[in-house]
Amino acid sequence: MTAPHPETHEVVAPGDLKALAAAHGPCLTALAPLPDRHIESQVKNAIQGLQKKLAEQATDRKTISSLLEPVFDLAVMPKTEGIWPQAMILFRSPDLFQYYLLHGQFKEAQTVDNRFHVRPLLRTLAHETRFHLLGLSQRRVRLWHCTQHRAEPATHGFPTNLQAWLNNHRPVSGSSTDRERDDEYLRHFFKEVDKGVTAHLHSETGPLLLAGVEREIAIYRRVNSYRPTLEKVVNGSPDGIPDRTLHERAMEVVAGTFSEPLQRVMMTIPECVGTPAASTDPRSIVQAAFEGRVLDLVIAANAEYFGVWNEETYSVETGRREELLNAAALQTIRHGGRAFVIDERDMPVKAAAAAVFRF
C-alpha cells in the first residue's frame, strides 16, 4: 500500500483508529524521533530495527520485503516545507500502512506483534490536533488554521487594520476620556473582525486560540461569538513574529490544555469510579474492553499491565506475552469507544488506568 495523502497524516481521524484496531498481524509499529527533521535517516533506522525483529521471528524474506517496501518509499520522500514534526509513528501490516507526525518528546521504538502499539498515538489525542489561531493587533489582525505541525494563513473577509477601518466606519462614541473612546473604537472594530472570523469558521472544527496583548484580548472576548474559544492565550503582540515562532508558542498553550472530548471524560470518571459504571482495576478493564463494554478509557503514560488474553476462555491470564492496556485501548476503539493516554500526574483518579462502561 502507498502512504496516505500528505494532508491526512498530520491529524488522526476516528476511522484511522478503527482500521488500526481491526488490523491482522504481523503488525509492525515504529516510533522515530525526528531531531532537526532528519526523516530519511530516522526512518531508515526504524526499518533496520523492524527487519531485525522480523528475522528474529523467522519471517521469510519475501514477507519481510513486501511489508517493508512502502516504508522504504517513505524514507526517501522529499521533505515537506511548512511542517514541523518532532516524531513520526508508522504502522504496517499485510493490509495496512499508515503513518502520523507527532508533537512531543518520544523514544525510538520498533515492535512486531499481533497488534499495533498505539499508545504513543493516543497520547497526542489528549490535546487538540486541529485549532485556529487569531492574532489580534490594531495594525494587523491575522488568522491561521493550525495542526500540531503547521500554521496555514487563512483567507478571510474581515478588516485587518484598525486605522484603515476607522477611516470608513468611524463609530459614534459617547465616552468621556480618550482611553474610553479608543476602547470603544477597538470594540466596534473587533466586532466586525468577529463577524468575519465566525462566518469563516462556521464549517470548521477545532477551538479558537487568541494571541495578543492583555487589553486587546479582553476587549475581543467581549464581542467574540465563536465557540469554543480556549481560555488560555498566547500572550504578547503577534506583530512581527514569524509564523513558525507564533505556532510554537501556540503549541505550548495547546499542549497544556486537554482536548474537549478528554475534558468531558476527565469530569465523568471521578463521578463513576466506585460504582459498577466504572473501574480502575486493569484486569476488569481489559476484560470489559474485549467484551465491548468500555465507553471511555484513560491510561497513564508510564503504566504497564502484562498478561495474556485467552480467546477461548475470554479471560486474562498471567504472563508477560503482551502489554494488555494497549490491547484494551485497541478493543475500546474497535467497539466505538474512546481511549486516551496522559501523564500519570494528570490522571483523574490515582490509578494506572480508568474506564467508564457502557453497561
Image (cartoon, rainbow, N blue to C red):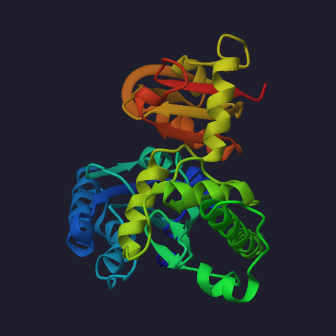
Residue at screen point 53% across, 71% down? 137
Residues 188 and 260: in front is: 188
Residue 43 location in percent, x, y?
Answer: 27, 68
Please determine whether, in this image, residue 92 is positioned above or below residue 127. Answer: below
Residue at screen point 59% across, 24% down? 285
Residue at screen point 69% across, 81% down? 158
Please determine whether, in this image, residue 335 is positioned above or below residue 291. Answer: below
Residue at screen point 48% across, 64% down? 94
Residue 64 location in percent, x, y?
Answer: 32, 66
Please determine whether, in this image, residue 288 is positioned above or below residue 173. Answer: above
Q: Outermost residue, front direction?
A: 176
Residue 77 location in percent, x, y?
Answer: 34, 83
Residue 45 location in percent, x, y?
Answer: 20, 64
Residues 148 and 107: in front is: 148
Left-right relation of 187 to 11: right
Q: Quadrant of residue 59?
A: bottom left
Residues 6 and 326: in front is: 6
- Assign the C terminus to one quadrant of the image: top right
- Counting the numbered discs, the total is 0
Left-right relation of 239 to 13: left
Is there any visible trace of residue 14 in the rendered image? Answer: no
Left-right relation of 283 to 38: right
Q: Quadrant of residue 229?
A: bottom right
Is there any visible trace of residue 280 in the rendered image? Answer: yes
Residues 288 and 88: in front is: 88
